[in-house]
Image (cartoon, rainbow, N blue to C red):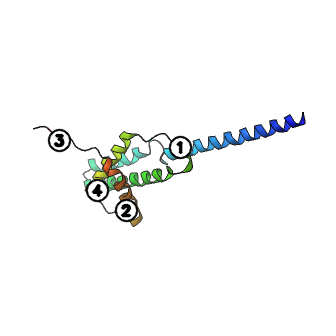
Amino acid sequence: MRRYLILGIVSVALLTASSYLGARAGYDAGRLDSMYRAPGEGAADLAGTLQLLRSGNVSDAETLMEARLDNEFVERWLYDRQSNRVLSFLRPPENEALVKLIGSAAQYRASHPCVPASPRVGAIVGEVVAKYEPHAVKPRMSPN
């Protein structure tokens, strides 16, 4: 009887530990997939940029948009680095359409480089551009 009691306690402890570790891994994968951004956070950036454009301040609006693009590349770089973790098998497969969209943004950045916020940001942006630019959607040739 005592043997069954010990076996039961050990089983419950192992089940609890494995449940905790599984839930923790799922939480971490979900948190990392959110790209560290709260929903709606970009709305303030867009509204500020639109206000600059409407007031005729195109140069400042362009600067903000270029900085935001570099920020997106840095976030993607962080996401890609997190994807190499041991628990990355919990993450769903990469969306092919998203990779093409990132490729199009990378193609833009390759064609229109800007001065990065720091040399480190420039290196990170360059790494992401090199990785994703080949995936950009190629323009279709119009039949003439």
Q: Residues within 10 Å of mark 2 (few under 14, many from 20)?
A: some
Label 2 with label 4: CB-CB less than 8 Å: no
Chain-order first, disc 3 or disc 2: 2
Circle 3 residues within 10 Å: few <14, some 14–19, many ≥20: few
How crowded is the residue under tag 1: few (<14 C-alpha within 10 Å), some, or many (20+)? few
Residue linked to disc 3? 141
Q: Nearer the viewer, mark 4 or mark 1?
A: 1
Disc 2 to disc 4, C-alpha distance: 12 Å
- Quarter of the figure with the C terminus: top left
Q: Is residue 57 above or below residue 94?
A: below
Check disc 4: other Cα within 10 Å, few if <14, some if 14-19, many if 20+.
Answer: some
Q: Amino acid at mark 1?
A: Phe
**Circle 1 sits on which residue?**
89
Residue 122: which numbered mark, if any?
A: 2
Quarter of the figure that contains the N terminus: top right
At horizontal 82% and vertical 37% (from top left) the residue drawn is 7
Q: SS at mark 3?
A: loop
Residue at image location 67% in from the left, 39% down from the top: 19
Q: How many marks?
A: 4
Residue 143 location, quadrant = top left
Using the numbered discs, state the Cα–Cα distance from disc 1 to disc 3 in whole angstroms: 39 Å
Q: Which mark sits nearer the N-terminus, 2 or 1?
A: 1
Q: Nearer the viewer, residue 92 or 60?
A: 92
